[in-house]
Structure formats: structure tokens, C-alpha cells
């Protein structure tokens, strides 16, 4: 009787049957943008931190945020909108790495953006684009010029 769709919730309560709580009250999409900061750049590998203005090193999971989506854009100027960016990845962690392809040369300007999303995959506003310059990897061996 508890699982029957033919009997209303009110009728079940009158009969003394326990009616499970309605779990459809989902939280709305986040209404704030993340604070995206660059922790390090090692060659083509960029390590980011995703947080908020109040807590820049921690994702605000207590506000209905399930994770964040990271976007990138390659060019000298900031992207005109998130729609112009490339999807990099989604994460539920505050610290994330983005590895750019080998076709991105050292000295190239790239831009990173992020937005939060909730459990129903509804997204909030994107943060301002953060500039990053791809550099030479610190783990690369030094090349020496040999005089002939």
C-alpha cells in the first residue's frame, strides 16, 4: 500500500501508513561565481585553486555546489564569453590541474574560467577570465649550446 500510486499521500496518512518525505526540493543553481586562482604553472601544466571570495582555497559545497567546470581559451585577449572557451574538465575538488596540449608553445597566453554547478547540473555564472602564460617546464633538462 505504501508504494501504491493509486492511493493519495493524505489517504495513506489517515490509514497510519508512513509516507516518505518528498525529496524533489532541489537547491537552485549557484548564484555566485567562483574565485579562480593559479597556484602554479609548470610547462603546459597549470594548477588552479577553486574557491569563493570569502574562502579562496575551498569549494563551497555547503551552498549546494556539487562541483565546478573549468574552461580555457588560447589568445592574447580574454575570451568574449564562456561560449568561446574550450571545455577542460569538471571537478568536485578545490585544487585541479589543466594540461594543455603540446601544440601550445611556451610564451603563449591562455585564459581560464570556471563556473559552479549543483547536483542537477544547473550552472551558475562564470568568473572573470584569469590569464596564464605557458612557460618552460621546470623538469626539462637544460640545453647547452656547444661551440664548434
Image: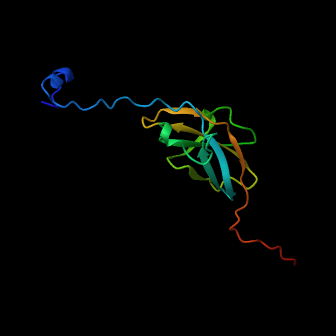
Q: How many marks?
A: 0
Q: Is residue 75 visible?
A: yes
In this picture, is 147 found above or below 110? Answer: below
Q: Position of residue 19 (x, y in %)?
A: 21, 30
In this picture, is 142 found above or below 2? Answer: below
The one nearer the camera, 125 or 108, is 125
131 sits to left or right of 63: right
For the C terminus, the image quarter is: bottom right
Where, by quadrant of the figure, is residue 142 drawn? Answer: bottom right
Q: Position of residue 53 (x, y in %)?
A: 64, 39
Where, by quadrant of the figure, is residue 5 drawn? Answer: top left
Instruction: Single out the residue that lies furthest toward the right.
Output: 148
For the N terminus, the image quarter is: top left
Q: Residue, x 28% and y 31% (percent of image)?
A: 21
Q: Position of residue 118 (x, y in %)?
A: 47, 36
7 sits to left or right of 34: left
Q: Is residue 6 visible?
A: no
In this picture, is 19 found above or below 87? Answer: above
Q: Residue, x 16% and y 25% (percent of image)?
A: 12
Question: Which of the colour schemes (rainbow, by chain, secondary structure, one colour) is used?
Answer: rainbow
The one nearer the camera, 98 or 18, is 18
Q: Position of residue 98 (x, y in %)?
A: 60, 52
The one nearer the camera, 36 or 106, is 36
In this picture, is 59 found above or below 82? Answer: below
Where, by quadrant of the figure, is residue 15 drawn? Answer: top left
Amino acid at each position: 500500500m505504501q508504494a501504491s500510486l493509486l492511493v493519495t499521500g493524505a489517504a495513506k496518512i489517515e490509514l497510519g501508513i508512513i509516507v516518505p518525505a518528498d525529496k524533489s526540493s532541489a537547491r537552485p543553481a549557484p548564484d555566485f561565481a567562483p574565485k579562480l586562482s593559479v597556484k602554479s604553472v609548470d610547462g603546459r601544466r597549470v594548477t588552479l585553486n577553486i574557491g569563493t571570495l570569502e574562502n579562496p582555497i575551498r569549494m563551497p559545497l555547503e551552498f549546494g555546489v556539487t562541483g565546478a567546470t573549468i574552461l580555457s581559451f588560447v589568445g592574447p585577449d580574454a575570451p568574449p564569453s564562456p561560449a568561446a572557451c574550450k571545455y577542460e574538465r569538471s571537478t568536485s575538488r578545490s585544487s585541479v590541474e589543466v594540461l594543455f596540449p603540446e601544440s601550445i608553445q611556451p610564451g603563449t597566453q591562455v585564459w581560464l574560467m570556471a563556473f559552479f554547478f549543483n547536483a542537477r547540473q544547473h550552472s551558475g555564472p562564470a568568473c572573470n577570465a584569469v590569464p596564464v602564460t605557458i612557460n618552460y617546464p621546470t623538469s626539462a633538462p637544460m640545453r647547452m649550446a656547444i661551440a664548434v
